């Protein structure tokens, strides 16, 4: 017995306790729910069976039902638009800003740091602000775009079915750009300066230097940033209730929000769980890419 | 250098870009200072005609913001406490060894980091309902949000521990310290700053937590500020100056802390794990 306590205080037992406590906690509150989610997607869940673990088996009925929902393909399309447009916007703007702030000028690091406020703000507040900026008749974005001559007519970002998903995309690009920029800036800073000097001596212009030095040297960073962007975009939830609530007529709903609506507005927990499982498969795919591209860094 | 190089021009450009990017924040504060009729001017005024702060006390008391914000603080403190206590030890062990098992543990933690809250909320809600945790809704939210926050914390703090020289800990062990003693008197103090930055980040994100609170907490006097905001926010909102005043009260403390600690937060984020 005393050997046991000694090991806790001064041996491998100490490590096991430290790592075990955290892993048990995560297992109970993330691992188990995940498995439970899969189980529920194969069960009939209603108000009467909500409190029990053993419920009537449903087989693949839930999956068939979800795919047959009239809005299924609309939501799937919206999810793809939301994910890829957000990622592209965040990455392109973030990369441009990172390249710009890699120049040497006074205050570069401080000003760059200010951009990150978008990242620490509560998602719901970001959604509220953008909801007001994107408002149709009184929104400031329409005013600015009109005075620049980009649009002639008022665009009803939130209530026009053609634009509603883009309203959320715009807000999400703003939200994620700073984080992309920060990670890419770290990658840029790690490229040895003398590579650029050598290329310049050899007569390479700025575009060639970017294409033959910056991009190849940044490959693993770009992989990590893109997969983190994919994961972050799939995790985005707060913007939807704040800006469009998925409407009008589901034209701006994505898988995560749809799943939540099923469970917490229609109380159809089985369908909610089923959509979650489908979405989880997508996240799994993204995380495999993420783990592969960060493996070297994580092992340190 | 072949091209003309003028740092001051770049600085001006940088300030312009920052101003453009931070325009939404400016718009939040400006709108909150406008009168109820001025917010519907078309075209909108870029500076309020008669800046009026009376909406702030009105929103603060009318929306019982002190209760909402207090609940946000309680939830964020709980999440931060659990995350720091459990996560720090885990990160330390994962930084100390290199083996297949550590890789497996890290892989599991990274996998948990990517789970969207909207995927987890359905099973968590049903599970909490079965074990009776829904009767203690704030505790339930704290537990759920801590599990969400911990993987990110572990990955970041692990990077901090990796930068603590192994030799210092070994020297303490040679001098007769136990593992526990060396951990608390040598390793932890050296990693203190990194842990603190990560704890602040955890607190900030838990302070804005929305989906778990919205789904789990039904009683109005237990809800955090995010749920309070969602109560009068939607596609058909109209009292925008009140919404913006509420938002301003909600985020200004976060923004202030962030601007004050900006350098540390940014360097904490960029060291190690996120490279």
Image (cartoon, coloured by chain):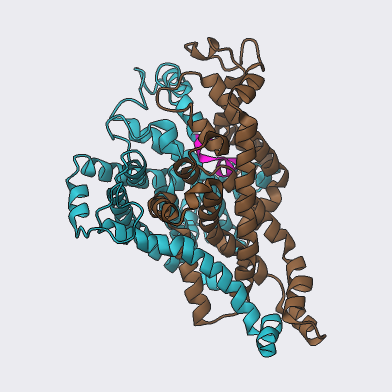
Q: Position of residue B204 (x, y in %)?
A: 61, 46
Of B50 and A235, the residue lying toward us = A235
Dominant SS in magenta: helix
Up/down of B180 relative to B53, above or below:
below
- Chain B tint in image: brown
Q: Identify the residue at image location x=45%, y=17%.
A: A138
Q: Position of residue A11 (x, y in %)?
A: 67, 85
Q: Position of residue A232 (x, y in %)?
A: 45, 51
**Residue A9 is a magenta residue:** no
**Residue A119 is a magenta residue:** yes
Q: Identify the residue at image location x=61%, y=67%.
A: B158
Of B11 and B233, the residue lying toward us = B233
Residue furthest to the right: B175
Q: Quadrant of residue A251?
A: top left
Region rendered in magenta: A117-126
Q: Quadrant of the C terminus of chain B?
A: bottom right
Up/down of B272 relative to A279, above or below:
below
Give me the chain that's cyan: A
Q: Identify the residue at image location x=65%, y=40%.
A: B254
């Amino acid at each position: 017995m005393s050997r046991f306590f000694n090991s806790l205080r001064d041996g491998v037992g100490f490590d096991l306790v430290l790592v075990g406590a955290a892993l048990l906690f995560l297992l109970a509150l993330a691992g188990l729910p995940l498995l439970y989610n899969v189980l529920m997607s194969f069960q009939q869940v209603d108000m009467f069976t909500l409190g029990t673990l053993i419920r009537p088996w449903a087989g693949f009925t839930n999956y068939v039902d979800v795919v047959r929902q009239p809005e299924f393909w609309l939501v799937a399309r919206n999810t793809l638009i939301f994910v890829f447009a957000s990622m592209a916007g965040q990455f392109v703007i973030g990369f441009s800003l990172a390249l710009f702030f890699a120049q040497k000028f006074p205050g570069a690091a401080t000003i760059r740091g200010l951009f990150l406020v978008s990242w620490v703000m509560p998602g719901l507040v970001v959604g509220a602000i953008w909801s007001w900026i994107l408002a149709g008749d009184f929104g400031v974005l329409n005013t600015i775009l009109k005075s620049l001559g980009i649009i002639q007519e008022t665009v009803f970002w939130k209530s026009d079915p053609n634009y509603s998903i883009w309203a959320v995309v715009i807000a999400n690009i703003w939200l994620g750009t700073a984080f992309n920029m920060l990670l890419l800036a770290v990658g840029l800073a790690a490229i040895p300066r003398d590579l650029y000097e050598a290329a310049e001596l050899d007569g390479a212009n700025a575009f060639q230097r970017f294409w033959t030095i910056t991009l190849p040297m940044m490959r693993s960073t770009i992989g990590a940033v893109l997969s983190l962007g994919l994961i972050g975009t799939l995790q985005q939830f707060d913007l939807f209730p704040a800006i469009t609530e998925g409407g009008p007529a589901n034209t701006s709903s994505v898988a995560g929000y749809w799943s939540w609506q099923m469970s917490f507005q229609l109380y159809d927990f089985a369908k909610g769980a089923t959509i979650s499982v489908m979405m989880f498969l997508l996240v799994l795919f993204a995380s495999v890419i993420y783990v592969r591209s960060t493996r070297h860094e994580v092992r340190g | 250098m072949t091209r003309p190089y003028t740092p001051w021009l770049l600085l001006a450009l940088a300030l312009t870009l920052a101003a453009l990017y931070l325009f939404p924040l400016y718009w939040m504060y400006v709108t909150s200072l406008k009168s109820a009729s001025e917010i519907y001017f078309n075209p909108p005024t870029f500076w309020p005609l008669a800046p009026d702060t009376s909406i702030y006390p009105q929103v603060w008391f009318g929306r019982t913001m002190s209760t909402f914000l207090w609940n946000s603080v309680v939830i964020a403190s709980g999440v931060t406490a659990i995350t720091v206590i459990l996560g720090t030890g885990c990160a330390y062990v994962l930084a100390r060894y290199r083996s297949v098992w550590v890789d497996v543990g890290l892989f599991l933690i990274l996998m948990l980091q990517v789970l969207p809250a909207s995927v987890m909320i359905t099973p968590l809600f049903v599970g909490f309902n079965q074990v009776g945790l829904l009767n203690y809704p704030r505790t339930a939210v704290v537990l759920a949000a801590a599990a969400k926050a911990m993987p990110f914390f572990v990955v970041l703090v692990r990077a901090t521990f990796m930068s603590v020289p192994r030799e210092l800990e070994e020297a303490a062990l040679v001098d007769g310290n136990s593992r526990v003693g060396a951990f608390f008197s040598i390793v932890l103090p050296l990693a203190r700053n990194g842990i603190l930055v990560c704890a602040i980040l955890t607190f900030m994100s838990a302070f804005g937590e929305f989906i778990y609170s919205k789904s789990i907490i039904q009683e109005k006097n237990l809800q955090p500020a995010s749920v309070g905001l969602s109560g009068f926010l939607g596609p058909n909102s109209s009292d925008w100056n009140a919404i913006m005043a509420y938002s301003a009260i909600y985020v200004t403390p976060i923004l202030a802390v962030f601007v004050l600690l900006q350098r540390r937060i940014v360097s904490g984020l960029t060291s190690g794990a996120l490279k």
